[in-house]
């Protein structure tokens, strides 16, 4: 039986700091190298035929890090987005950001919006960057919106609630990969991961390769997803 490719893969790109520290380098070097890996994985995802990837780049809890490190990460995000537009266009990549934008600086917000608008019609792959993102924060913002818009409680169901989230229109992740040996979700896609399969690897994000990405997909294809039912099914 031909096993389905996951439609949506979430990736918790963890271990940049440890990668650098192990080499006696500043943490910044790990983040820089991590950006390169993210580029390669987006390419690989497009080639494999995944519809969407979500990359956890900066959590809402990461705002609690030292100011210097936050500055470095934000600077990298900004320069990466500026450099990346052409390759998103060439690769048919639709860029989106999920997360709490209010906390981002106006110049980053602006470059995010420009990139989202410029790539909105691209169809090959959606690359969703989780920036200033927390699953609980996303849920609370959705609930606030429902209350503000006086949504009829009788109409509320899974599908309608999903449409209130930042990920509206993107199917739930089939597979979530986390690098660096940590086995936790750290507030990533809290609502959406209800039936995701998980792939944990000890590899630190700056060492994560397209080959290992394919290995994770292969591992996913061997799983029996039951969704609470009795009979086996792929998706
Ligand atoms: C992941 O790497 C990137 C971000 C959270 C921004 P870390 O910076 O968490 O690296 P470790 O976990 O300290 O090694
Ligand atoms: C999760 O990594 C967030 C990102 C990868 C962007 P963290 O390094 O912040 O998570 P914890 O603190 O180990 O749970
Ligand atoms: Mg970490």
Image (cartoon, rainbow, N blue to C red):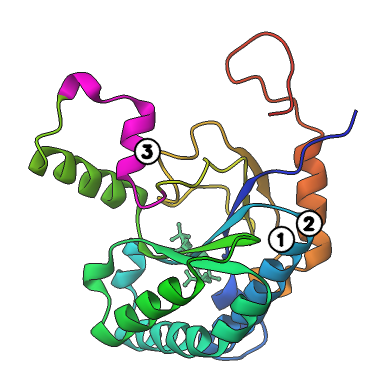
Quarter of the N terminus within the rendering: top right
- Residue that protrudes farthest toward the right in the picture: 1
Which residue was labeled with disc 1? 45
Residue in the image at 36% along x and 81% along y: 70
Q: Residues within 10 Å of mark 3 (few under 14, many from 20)?
A: many
- Asked whether residue 21 appears in the rendered view, the answer is no
- Residue 181 pos. (x, y %): 64, 56
Q: Which residues are magenta?
A: 153-167
Residue in the image at 27% along x and 76% along y: 104
Residue 48's disc is 2
SS for dot 1: helix
- Residue 90 pos. (x, y %): 67, 78
Q: Earlier in the sequence, mark 1 or mark 3?
A: 1
Which residue was labeled with disc 3? 162
Judged by its main secondary structure, the magenta piece is helix
Q: Residues within 10 Å of mark 1 (few under 14, many from 20)?
A: many
Q: Residues within 10 Å of mark 2 (few under 14, many from 20)?
A: few
Q: Nearer the viewer, residue 180 or 116?
A: 116
């Amino acid at each position: 039986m031909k096993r389905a490719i996951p439609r949506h893969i979430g990736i918790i790109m963890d271990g940049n700091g440890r990668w650098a520290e192990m080499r006696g380098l500043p943490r910044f070097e790990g983040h820089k190298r991590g950006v390169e890996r993210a580029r390669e994985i987006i390419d690989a995802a497009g080639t494999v035929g995944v519809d969407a990837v979500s990359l956890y780049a900066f959590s809402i809890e990461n705002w609690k890090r030292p100011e210097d490190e936050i500055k470095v990460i934000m600077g990298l995000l900004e320069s990466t987005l500026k450099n990346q537009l052409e390759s998103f266009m060439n690769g048919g990549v639709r860029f989106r950001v999920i997360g709490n934008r209010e906390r981002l600086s106006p110049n980053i917000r602006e470059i995010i919006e420009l990139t989202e608008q410029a790539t909105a019609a691209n169809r090959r792959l959606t690359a969703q960057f989780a920036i200033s993102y927390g699953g609980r924060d996303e849920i609370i913002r959705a609930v606030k919106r429902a209350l503000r818009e006086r949504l009829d409680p009788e109409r509320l169901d899974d599908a309608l609630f999903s449409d209130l989230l930042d990920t509206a229109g993107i199917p739930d992740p089939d597979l979530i990969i986390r690098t660096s040996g940590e086995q936790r979700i750290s507030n990533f896609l809290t609502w959406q991961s209800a039936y995701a399969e998980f792939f944990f690897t000890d590899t630190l994000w700056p060492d994560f390769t397209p080959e290992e990405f394919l290995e994770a997909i292969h591992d996913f294809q061997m799983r029996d997803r039951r969704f609470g039912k009795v009979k086996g099914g792929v998706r």
